[in-house]
Amino acid sequence: MSRSKLEYIWLDGYYPTQNMRSKTKVVADFSGKLEDCPVWSFDGSSTRQAEGGDSDCLLKPVAIYPDPERRDGYLVMTEVLNADGTPHASNGRAGIDDDDNDFWFGFEQEYFIMDRSTLLPLGFPVGGYPAPQGMYYCSVGGRNTHGRNLVEEHADLCIDAGLIFEGINQEVASGQWEFQLFAKGAKKAGDEIWVARYLLDRLTEKYGYYIEYHPKPLGDTDWNGSGMHANFSNTTLRTCGSKETYEKICESFRPVVKEHIAVYGEFNDQRLTGKHETASINDFSYGVSDRGASIRIPIITVEQGWKGWLEDRRPASNADPYKVAGRIIETVKSANID
């Protein structure tokens, strides 16, 4: 009889920034299939998702991946349900309106690698600053590149887990990196970002590091913040061949700026200042190849005859991809397109 370790991963009830939680279920003769993952439960009173007198919440498996770090292991992404089987208020995945997977997402997850002993980003000396920004972005070599071993190992883990992992690069600030993931279907895109974050966070345990997802961890200084740029498309964007249609879809975002910012991550006002490749949180703009705009129209989209995708540059690095994707879909579907 074989025994497998299923790591159930869920999002807790902390607001506005949820945290990942996980625990292991050992099962006998497991098939490796999602449909054979049982519904499980946990103590919601310990995660701000229930009261102590009625504390049980349910974990509904929604995606499964091989766990590349554990023998006979699997990573099981779950949704949190109330005891009666309805979606918990903290469950952003359940509200995504994309049952046909027409929407495709490519998320660019930025983050800082922090040294647990100094509580500073890698490359930062205690009591001071490293050389100014300029030489860190896509750098190579020990002077400007910090944390590559962890980043490379994380990339391998994501690929081995079967995620649609598309790339890595060091970002503009010292100790700041990015990875990219793509998925057809908003729910799958969110699943894969959360599983990739899980693998990254778990990996830091053996390095003496931790990951900082705060969008502006270095405060009001001349250092870049971290975002989670959301590249998105649907059939219309991929095939319309119309500048006018693209502009109508972009304009549909203008009247709902506050609704987007509300789910684009805590402390995002510290990052969206109009500096460091961001638009001001108080403005809305779009433009071709404009990394200072709220929404960038990629030049490739234009060169392909207005067939491609858009990039919302506003989501913060700590945003919930489920909520980001859900809000983008709602807005795009509201566009008045003939």
Image (cartoon, rainbow, N blue to C red):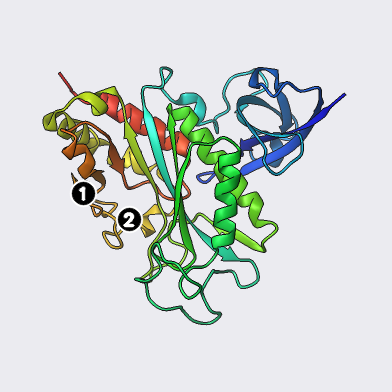
Give the residue number, with chain letter if any, for mark 2. 272
Q: Is residue 13 visible?
A: no
Task: Work out whether residue 211 or residue 19 is closer to the camera in this orientation and state it.
Answer: 211
Q: Does dot 2 land on a helix, a strand or a loop?
A: loop
Task: Work out whether residue 61 or residue 139 is closer to the camera in this orientation and state it.
Answer: 139
Q: Using a 10 Å C-alpha cutoff, classify the residue at mark 2 as few (fewer than 14 neighbours), some (14 to 19) or many (20 or more).
A: many
Residue appearing at x 24%, y 24% in the figure: 236
Relative horizontal placement of residue 159, taking residue 106 as reference (left or right): right
How many badges with numbers are in the image?
2
Task: Work out whether residue 152 or residue 123 is closer to the camera in this orientation and state it.
Answer: 152
View extreme (left): residue: 244
Relative horizontal placement of residue 128, taking residue 229 as reference (left or right): right
Give the residue number, with chain letter if any, for mark 1. 289
What's the distance in space between the residues labelled 1 and 2, CA to CA? Answer: 18 Å
User: Which amino acid type corresponds to the residue marked 1 in the rendered image?
Assistant: Ser
Relative horizontal placement of residue 17, taking residue 215 as reference (left or right): right
From the top left corner, tell me how far across and down residue 228 is, in percent.
41, 47
Q: Using a 10 Å C-alpha cutoff, classify the residue at mark 1 as few (fewer than 14 neighbours), some (14 to 19) or many (20 or more).
A: some
- Is 271 drawn above or below residue 330 in the view shown? below
Q: Earlier in the sequence, mark 1 or mark 2?
A: 2
Point out the image quarter for the C terminus.
top left
User: Which amino acid type corresponds to the residue marked 2 in the rendered image?
Assistant: Leu
Q: Is residue 170 visible?
A: yes
Where residue 271 sits, quadrant-wise, is bottom left
View extreme (bottom): residue: 127
Depth check, mark 1 against mark 2: the one in front is 1
